[in-house]
Image (tube, grey):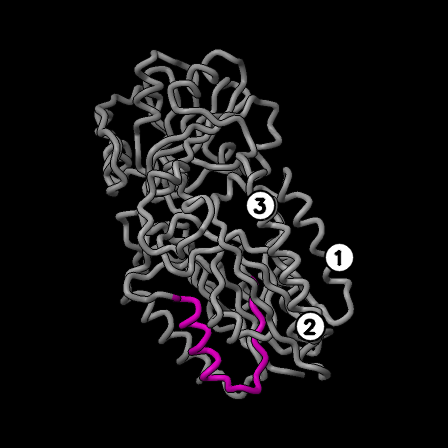
Amino acid sequence: MKRIAIGGLHTECSSYSPLLQQRPDFTRTTGDALIDLVPVDFAALGLEPVPIFHDRSVPGGPVAPDVFAAQVADFVAALRQAGPLDGALLLMHGAMFVPGVEDPEGAFLAKVRSVLGPGAILSASYDLHGQVTPAVAAALDAFAAYRTAPHVDVAETHARAARMLARALAGGPRPQVHLRPVPLLVPGEMSSTFVEPCKSLYAALPGHDATEGIWDANLMIGYVWADSPRATAAALVTATDPAAGAAAARAIATAYWEARHDLAFDMETLPLDAALDVVTACGPAILADSGDNPTAGGVGDRAEVLAALLARGHRGAVFAGIADPDAFAALQAGRPEILLGGTLGGGGPRIGLTADAVHIAQECAVADIAGNRVVITRRRRPFHDLATFAALGIDLDSHALLVVKSGYLSPDLRALPRRQVMALTDGAVSQDLAALANHHRPRGTFPFDR
């Protein structure tokens, strides 16, 4: 049996967010719960898993430098205490931003490599919205990224990385990761794998896997809301045949580049006022507040969409949700008069509201305000699962309009028989790329430099 460490760092950071991520923002998974993130029979693969830890946060702002330094130090110390290790399975995201650290994942992986030594096999899973640098590719022997956005293949991607790790440790030619950057960077909302052109681009990847000498082919969309020198798309191929790996990476990169003008939003997209005109008059609808989307790194505390909806006198909507610990605390304490919005630094108006009734559940206050149900949360969080609404006592069938802070919709919400509209709103993950500060991205990156 080969002893392998399991762990990683998993977050997505908007450099435009004012909110630094601190240690309490991360959930640390250890022990059997960490092993369970990888749906394989380790024993059958000839592997003995040694769980280190996996730190994951809701996407947000930059990670505080001291927090990142402590995470790396903790991981390195745990590796050294784990005894002899033949390799590591690293469950990553790839879009961490740390002030003063140009390539956080590259630095982390280099530390892991330095501890385990040149003979160890390192295999990683990544979110397709991560960034990959030459340092990352050089530190790894195998690489697997999600092939769906919205992401419905997370567990399978972990398994792909684990199977490659086992295969490499079983002997034979050692694989390497071939990297081909693509000077192209768009939001995930313009590169959903459920619509063209990315649907076909990702459907072609298993064909590369079937080529002799190639183990795993990947297309990385990258992360657009970090103004960083490493911000770019990329093709990555794990292969034991260098020529085949390089050729496949080149073909994947070329296909994506040639499709750049076809990349478009995967749902009806309008400025806020026009979007409200549509969703308040069309029957059952979902409105996505894209600029403040916490799953992409938005702060999740802006209230201008709610303010605009209330200014129209609209009733019967569910608004999920706004992160405001002060407003939550007031409602939890039985004080119905609140100021809502911008508490965490995300900007936008602060609006005075009165709750007619309040239900507290799961660190959320479900407040009846002017005939609407507004979910106010103690912590930043998304609302993407139907089970979450049920747990809060919200019957979506009783409400014609659902407003969520989101970009592309989750599979649960996408499946609802409602008109689906994305509002182009302000925030740390604004879809208005022309308005984003662009000081550090590589020159010539489309669409920033056409």
Q: Earlier in the sequence, mark 2 or mark 1?
A: 1
Residue 218, image x, y percentages = 62, 59
Residue where numbered disc 3 is placed:
149
Q: Which residue is mark 2?
A: 243
Separation (CA) of disc 2 from disc 1: 17 Å
Q: Is residue 395 visible?
A: no
- The span picked out in magenta is 103-125
Q: Amino acid at mark 1?
A: Gly
* Distance (Cα) linking label 1 and label 3: 19 Å
Write down the quadrant of residue 99 in the picture.
bottom left
Q: Secondary structure at mark 1?
A: helix
Query: Horizontal and vertical percent for residue 304?
Result: 30, 27
Picture coordinates of residue 349, whole percent (x, y): 23, 29
Tags 1 and 3 touching, CB below 8 Å: no
- The nearer-to-camera label among 1 and 3 is 1
Pointer 3 or 2: first along the chain: 3
> Residue drawn 43% across and 62% down?
55
Quadrant (top left/top right/bottom left/bottom right) for the C terminus: top left
Q: Which residue is mark 1?
A: 207
Whole-number angstrom distance, CA of label 3 to CA of label 2: 30 Å
Please tell me whether mark 3 sits on a helix, a strand or a loop.
Answer: loop
